[in-house]
Amino acid sequence: DVKVTQSSRYLVKRTGEKVFLECVQDMDHENMFWYRQDPGLGLRLIYFSYDVKMKEKGDIPEGYSVSREKKERFSLILESASTNQTSMYLCASSPNSEPQHFGDGTRLSIL
Amino acid sequence: DQQVKQNSPSLSVQEGRISILNCDYTNSMFDYFLWYKKYPAEGPTFLISISSIKDKNEDGRFTVFLNKSAKHLSLHIVPSQPGDSAVYFCAASAGDSNYQLIWGAGTKLIIKP
């Protein structure tokens, strides 16, 4: 069974802080993704990566960056957290041309 | 501008009856569609998919129908069971890409005993 693990289920941070969200997958998948989920908007893609050290912007990359130094780990970074980044963050991974597998999410609150 | 729309935020169905969840899309380049199911406090899990070369795909109690001319797809669950109560998301992609999935806002399905 594929396991995608997000380091925190809940996180509370202050505006202006640098925030790191970590995601690890155990199935040697090439692709990894970061989404945010907001009520009424579905899932929106922030960034994805199709290989180590490779990254591509998704639909809403502003205010975020990512890092993929190892195949199994994909980090999302909020450079200077703002209240409009309060959201549910979901990480996913997939092999090429197959459906994505998701972690259980991190609910991030920025105060 | 939402390219994938799930117009029903919620749907209530009697246990044992058929549940029909609908999804409309606007981009004619979409050629691969997926349904995911999400329980509270868990990530979405893949349910079923369909390629645009087909108009129907079936997996046990779940069937997805695609009407390309109407840009509409639907997920049928027969018979509905209490464990089917969840939020269902429709997603679409264009070309040979698993990357840029465009997601609907979700429909909350409630199965009544």
Image (tube, grey):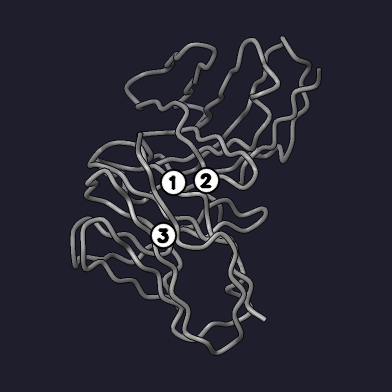
Q: Quadrant of residue A72?
A: bottom left
Relative horizontal placement of residue A51, taking residue B87 as reference (left or right): left
Whole-percent x, y for residue A49 in the image: 27, 59
Return the residue found at the far right: B113
Of labels 3 and 1, earlier in sequence is: 3
Same chain letter for marks 3 and 1: yes
Amino acid on which the number 3 mark rests in the picture:
Trp
Give the foreground label among 3 and 2: 2
Residue located 58% across and 39% down the image: B38
Residue linked to disc 1? A102
Residue B107 against residue A22 in the figure, above or below: above
Residue in front for this viewpoint, B22 or B68: B22
Under tag 3, what secondary structure? strand
Residue in front for this viewpoint, A66 or B105: A66
Whole-percent x, y for residue B104 in the image: 56, 44
Return the residue found at the far bottom: A16
Do labels 2 and 1 touch, CB within 8 Å? yes
Amino acid on which the number 1 mark rests in the picture:
Phe
Residue located 67% across and 81% down the image: A111
The chain letter under disc 3 is: A
Residue linked to disc 2? B43
Residue linked to disc 3? A34
Q: CA distance from mark 3 to mark 2?
A: 12 Å
